Amino acid sequence: MPLFSIDQEKCKRDGICVQDCPVQIIVQPDKDAFPAPAEDAAEFCINCGHCVAVCPHGALTLSTMPIDTCPPLQKDILPGSAALRQLLKARRSIRQYKKTPVPHSILAELIDTARYAPTGSNKQQVHWTVFENPDDVNRLAALVVDFIGVTLPFINDEDTAKRVRRIIAGWDNGKDRVMRGAPNLILVHSPADLPFVETNCVIALTYLELYAYAQGLGTCWAGYFTAASNMHAPLIEAMGLPAGHRCYGAVMLGYPKYEYKMIPQRNAPLTTWR
Ligand SMILES: Cc1cc2nc3c(=O)[nH]c(=O)nc-3n(C[C@H](O)[C@H](O)[C@H](O)COP(=O)(O)O)c2cc1C
């Protein structure tokens, strides 16, 4: 089967698909010819779907991407720049959660949305593990605290050691500074031997976090967990990732207990203009 087909009734031979293809595998020898796949098209296609998405006439069908999986873009419901900027400034790290876990359907929608994040060469090798049960999240937090305890004697820097001692003391007093009592945890992971793997995972998790905020949920990056996640054998076992995968990030998730009314100040950007 050819990589793509052209509906000759619809195609206006405007060459837009030819110009937009990021790997230049669409050929149109002259302006009267219809676009066609280059000889090596299947080998180099990254399946990004730009050719389908950019055609103003709906004339191109990619064999790997049935047209009913490519809905029309609803420009009228896109947020304006002011709305999006406000959302980006208003998102906060949430550290006080209600106990109610996030329903499965909402968790699934967050992940479904995050799969539209960009990935290097459109590889889409971002994997997710979702802990839906608050008891499991708490058990993971306990394992992180165990790990922190094991590392404490090897920490030379006194400031770090102090912070670590506070986490352990807090845990012993019923204060969870690792997972903040969040009912859910979402991990992002991938085979460790792919290019741009960490970047891909972090971008996807950032997409997820922002969409979660737009859905009225709260998130917080689980830095202590992520640091421990690829080093502590009991934690590695509890995560249950496929062989060869590394965890590149995690967010705690749940319904926020409190609402923020103001936007806190941030440092001036560290920019070099040339
Ligand atoms: C990579 C990363 C790791 C983080 N790890 C933690 C963490 O383990 N615990 C925590 O309470 N906050 C964690 N945070 C949240 C930051 O402290 C927070 O983003 C920062 O204070 C700014 O606050 P804001 O997110 O509300 O704007 C982490 C953030 C990032 C980006």
Image (cartoon, rainbow, N blue to C red):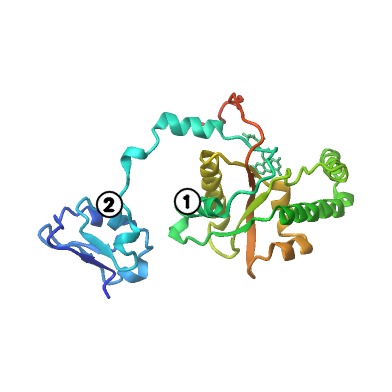
Which of the numbered marks, if any, corresponds to residue 54? 2
For disc 2, the neighbor class at 10 Å (few under 14, some 14 to 19, many from 20) is: some
For disc 1, the neighbor class at 10 Å (few under 14, some 14 to 19, many from 20) is: some
Q: Is mark 2 within 8 Å of ligand 1?
A: no
Q: Which residue is painted at 32% across and 55% down in the image? A: 50
- Residue 47: % across, % down: 37, 62
Would you name the residue on which mark 1 appears? 113
Q: Amino acid at mark 1?
A: Thr
The quadrant of the rendering that contains the N terminus is bottom left
In the image, is residue 46 above or below residue 75? Answer: below
Task: Specify whether 147 is left or right of 112.
Answer: right
Describe the element under mark 2 as helix, strand or loop. Answer: helix
Q: Is mark 1 within 8 Å of ligand 1?
A: no
Q: Amino acid at mark 2?
A: Val
In the image, is residue 167 above or below residue 266? Answer: below
**Location of residue 219 by image quarter:** top right
Q: Which residue is painted at 63% across and 46% down in the image? A: 253
Can residue 274 be seen here?
A: no
Q: Nearer the viewer, residue 162 or 114?
A: 114
Describe the element under mark 1 as helix, strand or loop. Answer: helix
Task: Specify whether 56 is left or right of 175.
Answer: left
